Image (spheres, grey):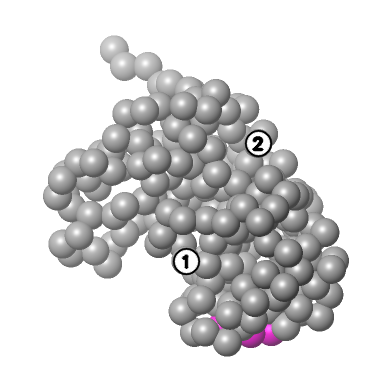
Amino acid sequence: MTTTTTTGFSPKDFEVFHIPGLEERMSGIIEHIRPKFQRIGEQLAADISPAVGNEMYLHIAKHARRTVNPPNDTWLALCASKRGYKAHPHFQLGLFDDHLFVWLALIYEVPGKRNIAASFLNDLDEFIAQIPEQYVVSVDHMKKEATRASELDTDGWEKLLTRFRDVGKAELLIGQHLKPNDPIVQDEQLLIEFAARTYHQLMPLYKKACLAYA
C-alpha cells in the first residue's frame, strides 16, 4: 500500500533535471514534483487571495510546447486569471537542479510591462525600499543566474528597470532562492510559510504592477 508524503522537496526531486530525454524527464516531473506543487500551490493560493483581494488560481507548468529538449526547471504559478498566468503579474515557486525559487514574476509576455516599469521608476525609492537586501532579482526566468538586491544601488535598479521597460524580451523576477539541502525546502509546511511570507512582502509591488498593467 502506498502512502502520501507531505514532506517538502527532496534531493531526488532536484535530480529529476539530470534525467536525459524529454519524455523521461517529464515523467519524473509528473511523478515526483507535480503532486507537491498541487498541495503547496493550493495552500499558497488560499493564503494570499485575501491580501490580493481576488481569488488566486493555481497553474502548474505543463511544458506542452516542448518537442525535443527537456525542461531545465519547472514551477507553479499563482495568478488572478483563471485562464492563464504568463500575460499577467503573478507569483511563482519552482525548481532548477541546484535551487528552489520563489518569485514575483513579470515575464516578457506581460503586455503592460512598459507601464509597469514606468510606474516603478516613477517611485524608485519606494520600489527599492520594498525589497529586502537578502532577496535576489533575475531578468530572465529561463536562466539560473540572479543578482542579490544588496548588490544593486539606486543606479543599478534604474538601469535594470529601464532595460525591463525598453527591451522586448527583458523580464523582472524578484524573490528568494533556497538550496536543495535547506531545511525549509525539505519541510513542506515550512516552505509554504516561507513562500507566503515572501509573497506578502512583495504584495505592494504586485498590486502596483497590476494597477499599472490595467
The disc placed on residue 140 is: 1
**Would you identify the image quadrant in which residue 203 lies?**
bottom right
Count the numbered circles shown: 2
Whether residue 129 is visible to the viewer of this picture, yes or no, is yes
Q: Residue 180, position in %: x, y?
A: 45, 32
Please give the residue where the numbered disc 2 appears in the rendered image: 194
Part of the protein shown in magenta: 111-115
Quadrant of image for the N terminus:
top left
Within 10 Å of disc 1 (Cα), the crowding (few <14, some 14-19, many 20+) is: some
Relative depth, front residue between 170 and 160: 160
Q: In this view, does 29 lie to the left or right of 166?
A: left
- Is residue 54 positioned above or below 107 on the image? above
**Separation of marks 2 and 1 at Cα, in angstroms:** 23 Å
Is-magenta flag for residue 112?
Answer: yes
Helix or strand or loop: what does disc 1 sit on?
loop
Q: In this view, does 158 lie to the left or right of 171?
A: right
Residue at 31% x, 59% y: name it. 63
Q: In this view, does 27 lie to the left or right of 63?
A: left
Residue at 58% x, 68% y: name it. 172
Given this view, does label 2 or label 1 mark the residue nearer the observer? 1
Q: Residue 190, position in %: x, y?
A: 62, 27
Relative depth, front residue between 82 and 70: 70
Residue at 66% x, 56% y: name it. 151
Relative depth, front residue between 157 and 9: 157
Q: Residue 182, position in %: x, y?
A: 52, 28
Relative depth, front residue between 96 and 3: 96
Quadrant of image for the C terminus:
bottom right
* Helix, strand or loop: magenta stretch: helix
Q: Which amino acid is tagged 1?
A: Asp
